[in-house]
Amino acid sequence: MRLLPIAAACALTALTATPAAAALPPNYQRLAELRAVLALPEVGRAFDLEPIERIEYAARDLYRLSAGRCHLDVRIVDLPTPRNVVGARRFEARAGRRICRR
C-alpha cells in the first residue's frame, strides 16, 4: 500500500525536473532577430565599404537595412519545430537582393 504513493511522488518529481524551453519576451526576441540579421554574410557583402546607416523593422519578420542609396531586405523565416517541443521560436534570417536608387 505504501508503494503507490512513493511511486506517484517519484513520477511527479521526474516530470517537474525535466528542462523546458520557454518563449523569449518580445524585447529579447527582437534582439535575437537583429543579431541573426547582422550575422548574415550577405549583409557584409551587400554593404562592403558603406556603413549601415539605418535598420528598420519594416513589417512583422521583415527588416530593412539601408546605407547610402542602397537597401537590403532581410526576412525572418520560421524553422520547423518537432511536434512535442514547445517554447522558444526557431528561426533563421534570409537576405533578399540589394536594391539601389539612381
Image (spheres, rainbow, N blue to C red):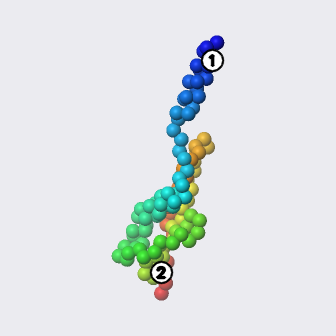
Q: Residue at x 43, y 68 (%)?
A: 43
Query: Residue 58: x percent and y percent?
Result: 56, 71
Q: How many marks?
A: 2
Q: Residue furthest left?
A: 49
Q: The residue under label 2 is which amino acid type?
A: Cys
Which is more foreground, mark 2 or mark 1? 1
Q: Residue 69 sits in which quadrant?
A: bottom left
Q: Residue at x 59, y 45 (%)?
A: 86
What is the crowding at mark 2: few (fewer than 14 residues within 10 Å), some, or many (at least 20)?
Answer: few
Residue wearing tag 1: 4
Q: Residue at x 54, y 62 (%)?
A: 76
Q: Secondary structure at mark 1?
A: helix
Q: Residue 92, labelled with which disc?
A: none
Q: The residue under label 1 is which amino acid type?
A: Leu
41 and 64: which is toward the camera: 64
Q: Is residue 18 above or below residue 89?
A: above
Residue wearing tag 2: 100
Query: Residue 1: x percent and y percent?
Result: 64, 12
